[in-house]
Image (cartoon, helix red, strand yellow):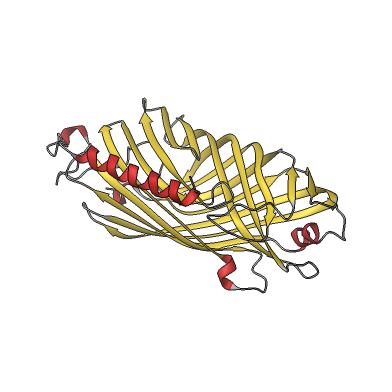
Amino acid sequence: MKLVELGKFIFTYLLTFMSLLTLGQDTTMVKDYGVCDESGYCIPKIPGIRKSRGVSFNYLNSLSYDISSQNEDSTYQGKINRDRRYTIKLKIPVINEDHMKFVVGLKYAEEEFKFKTFDEGFAFHSALNQKPLRRFGITGYLINPFKSNRFLVSRANFRLSGDFDNGNPEDYLRISASSLYGIRSSYNSTWGIGITYSYSFGRQLIFPILAYAKKYNKYWSLETLIPVNLSLRFNASKKDAFEFLTRVSGDSYNIQFDDYNPDNLFLQSSDLFSGLTYERNVFSILWMSVGGGYRYNYSFDLFRENNFNQRSDPEFSNDVQSSWFVDVGVFLVAPDKWIK
């Protein structure tokens, strides 16, 4: 079965399944349990798990690691001494009604590579050493609570990904989208099933997602979005929290070359980050975080085309050594009185 046909099958199956879930649903949830608001609409978010971030800045540094690049003819060795990632996010609430909530998000991310040793005659290593990989995009988040314990979450993202050098703007454009049908099964738990089209694993994929969140007590909580995210959180106090997080991060970047044919290639990059983070409330709505862990590289290969329904052999395949990382961040959270 071709990938497109498989995607259509999964999408149709999930829509049918989610429609069946709505049959016979109880629209008279008891408001005292906090599952619904005073108007009877579902409250999707479980209080006390993770605060919504309005503005955030994060710096992540992967420690030195080796990279080996191969094609049919040659192998090139290099050592990356510094791999720095800067990320700035801003979320702006546009609509905050009982029956609908809409948020616009802006994001700028930059990853900078600095080699300790590499073959200067190899165009890819030279390009990475000279030009950072950038992402700039806008995301729309739409939450539709129903008059029951059910809700629908949809997300669409449009961004530019690459070295932002010369080239066709269409080669930099990336689109991701997802939709999830959720059930607030109790005051302390929620789950949902949906589908996503994304570049989390480096290339365009359509795959099902399963979300689950559970608050066990005032200290411990769990959030997961299978297969891309898992978070186990310990709230030591109102001002201190520890979080064990495992997440997949990836994209497809357009890279321009000055002395290589073709003059542009697509880098399909994907990493698995697993680590521990400590968060501290500095004052009022300002928080800071510091953490570290281990990064495992899943994909870092170069392709001539950025195709969805066709898989070709890479122009260059890269063997990237896994490494440790450290990250720090500051962020502003939404005041409790703004959250409904």
Tell me, yes or no, if residue 310 can be seen here: yes
Count of numbered circles on the image: 0
Image coordinates of residue 46 in percent, x first then y, are 32, 37
Q: Is residue 41 left or right of residue 316?
A: left
Tell me, yes or no, if residue 284 can be seen here: no
Image coordinates of residue 62 in percent, x first then y, are 70, 44
Residue at the front extreme of this rendering? 1
Judge by depth and name the residue closer to the eye, 64 or 198: 198
Judge by depth and name the residue closer to the eye, 186 or 161: 161
Task: Note whether 129 is above or below 69 in the view shown.
Answer: below
Residue at the top extreme of this rendering? 217
Judge by depth and name the residue closer to the eye, 300 or 9: 9
Give the residue at x 56% y 70%.
170
Image coordinates of residue 208 in percent, x first then y, are 42, 42
Image coordinates of residue 267 in percent, x first then y, are 66, 56
Give the residue at x 74% y 53%.
316
Task: Note whether 29 is above or below 140 in the view shown.
Answer: above
Give the residue at x 65% y 45%.
299
Q: Is residue 199 left or right of residue 52?
A: right
Give the residue at x 73% y 49%.
317
